[in-house]
Image (cartoon, rainbow, N blue to C red):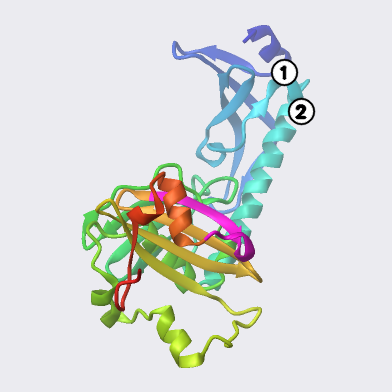
Amino acid sequence: MDTARLKQLGLEVRDGGRGLTALLSLTEPLDNPAGHRKVERVDFRVEGERLVPVAPPEVVGLRPIALGAVREARDVEAEVADAFNEHLFHVQRRSAELQALGLSARVDPHSLVLSTEVSEHGLTLTLVADRQGHFRVSSAVRDGQSLPLPQAHTFELSEFRERSALVGYLAALFGEQGQQPARQAAGEGLIGFSEIVRAFGHEALVPPRSGLELLVLLEVEGKPYRFAGARVAGRTFRGLLAGAQGKVWAERFELDDFPGVVPLVASLLKVPAEAVKLVGAGPPQE
């Protein structure tokens, strides 16, 4: 990167031996409402044709600025302000969504990072939102033991209308090694869909706005997997396939286009359908 170009943008350029950094003094400081302080300067790391905010804590993780999109210092400042205000909007929106789910919303006064904690049945997870409002699991502990985290996995909080749906989704991400068969877990409150059909009949309907969650336990080549599905709205569902090492697949799908759990798992794991075995609470299924 041509340092003259950076200086033309009103940036103070430094070379610390690990690459260029650029400093911008703001004419209109950013307001940190949680820490009750003003951000008067932003430090960037220069990466090719991008400026990546790296300091102070309030701006770390904001979207990079493309140098081709700015001509002068006020353009750079406007990009920073837009990204910062967008982050504050996400913090407010996600905080309200967490509270609606019965979860506490914590905002770090220095970094303005939003986080919460979910604890259920011995599993305690810390969830952290990025600057774009997407959540990820930053720590996972089961019965006092830390668990490995799924790599680069984020999720959309607004898809979960009930706390139980969120807990079920997260629990599927961290399915225990060597899962117990569902027939053993049935005493913990699991209900087979065959029992629902037997009790209410094939003609029973799911109301348009009611939630619907399901869990399918599987075994593929001796390894345990879990498929979790939850209704988002109408005939749209959110699905997750997780194994002992974490998430394998997670996407939305339309009920009418869904091929079925076994064909989906076989396709994702690139195995024949007969290699996918369902683990049910009732008699083994053919």
Q: Do the residues labelled 2 and 1 touch (CB within 8 Å)?
A: yes
Q: Residue 157 carries which label?
A: none
The residue where tag 1 is placed is 9
What SS does tag 2 mark?
helix
Tag 2 residue:
75
Which corner quadrant of the image does residue 96 belong to? bottom right
Disc 1 crowd, CA 10 A, few/some/many (<14, 14-19, 20+): some
Specify the quadrant that holds the N terminus.
top right
Q: Is 159 in front, or is 67? A: 159
> In the rendering, at what x and y percent does residue 106 appear?
47, 59
Point 46% across, 13% down: residue: 16
Quadrant of the snapshot with the C terminus: bottom left
Q: Does the magenta stretch include residue 279?
A: no
Residue type, mark 2 in image: Asp
Please determine whether, in this image, residue 52 is positioned above or below residue 8.
below
Against 217, residue 164 (above or below) is below
* Residue 248 belongs to magenta span: yes
Real-space Cα separation, disc 2 to disc 1, in angstroms:
9 Å
